[in-house]
Amino acid sequence: MKENREDEALKRIFEGTSAHTGREFFRQLVKNLALALDTDGAWVTEYLREKRRLRALAFWINRDFVDHYEYDITGTPCEPVINEKCLVHYPEKIIEIFPNDPDLKQYHAVSYMGIPFTDTEGEILGHLAVMDSKPLPGDAKKEAVFKIFASRASAELQRIRAEEDIREREEKLAGLIGNAMDCIIELDRSLNVTGCNRAVEKTFGCTMNELTGQNIGEFLTNQSCEKLEKLLDGMSNGSGEKRGFWIPGGLKAISAGDAVFQAEATLSQFEIRGERYFTLILRDINERLEADRKINSLSAQAEYLKEEVKSIHNFDHIVGVSDALKNVLKQTEQVTATDTTVLILGETGTGKELFARSIHNLSNRKNKPLIKVNCAAIPASLIESEFFGHEKGAFTGATQRREGRFALADKGTLFLDEVGELPLDLQAKLLRVLQEGEFEPVGSQQTRRIDVRIIAATNRDLEDEVKEGKFRQDLYYRLNVFPITLPPLRERDEDIIILAETFLDKYMRQIGKAGLQLSQENRARLRSYHWPGNIRELENIIERAVITSAGPSLNLDLSLPYPEKHEKPLVTERTGLDHEFHVFTSEELNNMERKNIIRALESTGWKVAGKNGAASLLGLPPSTLSSKIKTLKIQKPH
């Protein structure tokens, strides 16, 4: 009779749980287990190893379920179950054995039985337990039933966890494929699209649903479609060992609006229930090429700007109060807010680059770069590459692709310094860029469009150059839209001392000297000098004087020549100063300049150009100094 009751209990538990899986299985298990064993409560848990806690998957007590039940195993009858990994049975006096377990007192527990369940590697997954308010004598048949359902609970918990792992992996895989930037397209043997990811919407201009079911051939050029079919035939007829490969040369695909683009491509195959499918992955390389171009352009721009920062040595602001300067500043202010081409004219050393920077910095393009090209400093063989850039292998020495100055100045300003030095053949190409806003890099057939404002500068008389056939008339008119002529320093008498004091302060701080001042004699000498090198020459003279002066007055003797003692001034005037200043004839000024150039040549061993040459010492371009040497008939002594 007892055996029949136990068999009936076992049957009841089986029938109560057989129709359920997952969380509902655990609820039915503990409910039917408690009813079959005639206990007040039963529960099944999962073990949280790091916390040493048990969390109920289902808890049945006093004919009702308790949700969200979790507890620390320390000091509970469940602790030896977990620690010893075996069935534990306390038939009575459970509260006396575990006095610190509050739940036992709450439910008036007397007896307890629990059994752990493990995974295939023997690690504890959780446990199954019953509790009653009356004694629970030992019974081998009940313990056997208990072990059976502990195993069943273990299997179900492992199944749930495996299912959750699979679901998580599927979600990750779906996210990985769905968010990939490359187009991932699944094809059957007939080239019909059986699935795709979200990237196709951007690349092909159609939705995923619109592409699915279509033949991929409709989105490829005829040549690429034939190429893909041959590759599929080769894979289908092969041994199947080669599961995937890069497609040499890629494929040409067609997006919305019949736009053809080149795509890198890979092809692979897989089987599901004996049916063969193919995965085609496409990447639009136009975006990558454009990104590479932008990166290269920004890198080249950054390198150029680094060099520009190193080369800037002029004062930060335009200094002066003369009327001649004020007129130029007024013209500059009028043209800054426009994109008009500006031609800055003036002798060497008058600050043409400084005015070009001011025009750019006050314009709407100030947040874009000002790119400078010194047309006189670039060899004729390389100047076209400097202007327009070149492709790798375009000429001997072109080991990599390079952006030209026009591309670097896109949306910004291009400053063509010494534009009068451009060769005639390049003048024609420059004219085309100015007229049409496009060019081709050296060695390339691809036309580039740019938006560049031009500021040009020269110390030459371009009208005379045009008459002599050295400068194109059409280019001259294209550049001469808004001419600004900078006055030479000799026409800015009020500014000479202001500039000198500015440079004096600058180089005292830079060199680390203090207390030097312009004496009245210094001021008179500076104002009486003709300044053939203009502001650049004044700056160089002050810098040299600061270096050689011991103070307190600035020593100009080694920098600025005295007039010969026998020379008499054409005019002698009294001023508010303690000394006279002299105005010299042009012949006297030429003699002074000649002697100053000879002194510079002698100090450099008659070296004109290059580092430590006389041109650098005088602050003059080598071409200008060579012209002066010829004009003044200066010859190196034998």
Image (spheres, helix red, strand yellow):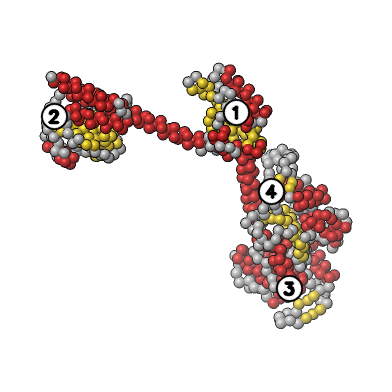
Question: Residue at the location (83% across, 73% down)?
Answer: 585
Q: Is residue 434 left or right of residue 168?
A: right
Spot occupied by residue 559 in the image (x, y as percentages of width and height): 72, 66
Q: Earlier in the sequence, mark 3 or mark 4?
A: 3
The residues tagged by marks 1 and 4 sit, at their Cα atoms, a distance apart of 42 Å
Q: Is 154 placed left or right of 518 in the picture?
A: left
Which disc number belongs to residue 317?
A: none
How many neighbours does mark 1 have within 10 angstroms: few (below 14), some (14-19), or many (20 or more)? some
* Numbered disc 2: secondary structure: loop
Q: Secondary structure at mark 1?
A: loop
Q: Which disc number belongs to residue 407?
A: 4
Q: Which residue is mark 2?
A: 136
Q: Which mark is residue 215?
A: 1
Closer to us: 630 or 386: 386
Amino acid carrying label 3: it is Asp
Classify 440 as above or below 459. Answer: above
Spatial CA span between label 2 and label 3: 115 Å
Q: Please tell me which of labels 2 and 4 falls first in the chain.
A: 2
